[in-house]
Image: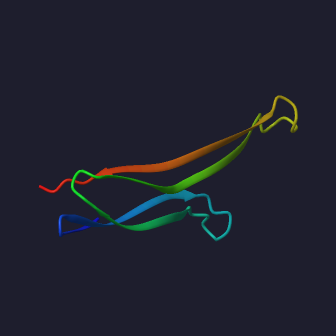
Amino acid sequence: MKTIIKNNAIDLKINQQLSNFVKTDTGVNQSPTLIKRDIVTDVTLKSGDIVVLGGLAENKITEGETGFSFLPKGILSGSSKSNSKTDIIILLQVKEI
């Protein structure tokens, strides 16, 4: 975060990042891939002001199967599916000291 104070105002340059590793199905060693998303925001506030920053959201669907490897598929086996949603919200209050 870069901060500049002038004329009773505070200028901020805010960098937000959301990153995680995902499974790679291609390539030789199947190493995970880093997925990064960035947002850069410039805001001008007065001392004591509050800003709410959002916009970094993620929807993830995970599927899995359970069972015994030595039994045919469908006998004592099952599947699962989950859906998760993540929203990143930042509340920031600035104060001149």
State the colouring used for the structure image. rainbow
Rendered-image quadrant of the C terminus: bottom left
Residue 22 falls left or right of residue 93? right
Residue furthest top as drawn? 76
From the top left corner, tell me how far across and down residue 40 is, in percent.
41, 68
Q: Image quadrant of residue 35?
A: bottom right
Residue furthest front as drawn? 7
Q: Nearer the viewer, residue 44 or 89?
A: 44
Residue 27 falls left or right of residue 91? right
Look at the picture and state if 50 lies above or below 76.
below
From the top left corner, tell me how far across and down residue 33 is, in percent.
56, 64
Identify which residue is drawn at 16% across, 57% down. Answer: 96
Identify which residue is drawn at 88% across, 37% down. Answer: 72
Q: Nearer the viewer, residue 29 or 52?
A: 52
From the top left corner, tell me how far across and down residue 84 is, in percent.
62, 43
Q: Nearer the viewer, residue 77 or 51?
A: 51
From the top left corner, tell me how far across and down residue 61 is, in percent.
68, 48
Rendered-image quadrant of the N terminus: bottom left
Residue 2 falls left or right of residue 69? left
Look at the picture and state if 37 lies above or below 87.
below
Identify which residue is drawn at 64% across, 71% down. Answer: 27
Residue 47 falls left or right of residue 53? left
Look at the picture and state if 42 lies above or below 53.
below
Q: How many marks?
A: 0
Identify which residue is drawn at 40% across, 67% down. Answer: 41
